[in-house]
Image (tube, rainbow, N blue to C red):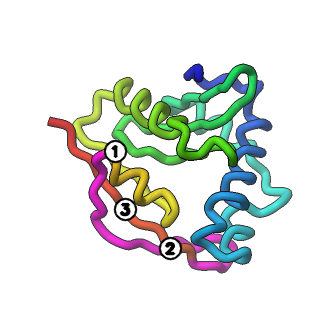
């Protein structure tokens, strides 16, 4: 597996990976209606490119296939972390989070974790702070705020 910095030419692949990840992985913990609100078909992702350029954004490749991506703000907030279905539990997410954390000067990290990713983040040393709810297209999605402090 290779970890690389974000390049604009991969944006469409990233958005397709995001949609597949939500619909094929997160759907194990979320209803079809919740997944549709989270990753609606036909969504305009153009703003993501600007966000990815403004943050530390990393891509994971297996050979030439994009298998994951993640982005982190300067303050240590992990905004997105998605893995291609079929590549979960193969070290992709761990490699991305470890690389993002190592590139950051932050003394603590935080993430609003999906229900399906909560055990993954616990294994990486994140602690659940509180349960949260976020509204997307009139649908309330459950997640949780998790933090990790660095000595």
Can residue 93 be seen from the camera position used here? Answer: yes
Dot 1: few (<14), some (14–19), or many (≥20) neighbours within 10 Å?
few
Sequence-earlier tag: 2 or 1: 1
Number of marks drawn: 3
Magenta span: 125-140
Query: Is 49 drawn above or below residue 148 in the view shown?
Result: above
Q: Are marks 3 and 1 in contact (CB under 8 Å)?
A: no
> Residue 22 location in percent, x, y?
67, 58
Camera-side mark, 2 or 1: 1
Magenta stretch contains residue 138:
yes
Quarter of the image with the N terminus is top right
What residue do we see at 49% from left, 33% from top? Answer: 96
Measured Cα–Cα span from mark 2 to mark 1? 21 Å
Residue assigned mark 3: 145
Sequence-earlier tag: 3 or 1: 1
Residue assigned mark 2: 142
The part of the image, by quadrant, that contains residue 87 is: top right
Measured Cα–Cα span from mark 3 to mark 1? 14 Å
SS at circle 2: strand
What residue do we see at 64% from left, 58% from top? Answer: 25
Quarter of the image with the C terminus is top left
Magenta stretch contains residue 18:
no
Measured Cα–Cα span from mark 2 to mark 3? 10 Å
The part of the image, by quadrant, that contains residue 11 is: top right
Residue assigned mark 1: 124
Query: Is 57 drawn above or below residue 33 in the view shown?
Result: above
Q: Main secondary structure of the magenta part?
A: strand
SS at circle 3: strand
Can residue 4 be seen from the camera position used here? Answer: no
């Amino acid at each position: 597996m290779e970890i690389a910095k974000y390049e604009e030419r991969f944006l469409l692949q990233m958005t397709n990976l995001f949609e597949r990840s939500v619909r094929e992985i997160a759907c194990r913990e979320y209803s079809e209606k919740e997944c549709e609100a989270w990753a609606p078909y036909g969504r305009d992702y153009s703003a993501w490119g600007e966000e990815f350029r403004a943050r530390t954004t990393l891509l994971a490749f297996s050979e030439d296939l994009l298998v994951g991506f993640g982005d982190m703000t300067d303050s240590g907030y992990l905004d997105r972390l998605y893995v291609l279905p079929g590549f979960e539990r193969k070290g992709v997410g761990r490699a991305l989070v470890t690389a993002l954390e190592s590139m950051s000067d932050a003394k603590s990290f935080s993430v609003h974790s999906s229900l399906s990713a909560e055990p993954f983040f616990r294994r990486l040393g994140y602690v659940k702070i509180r349960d949260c709810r976020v509204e997307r297209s009139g649908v309330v999605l459950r997640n949780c705020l998790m933090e990790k402090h660095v000595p």
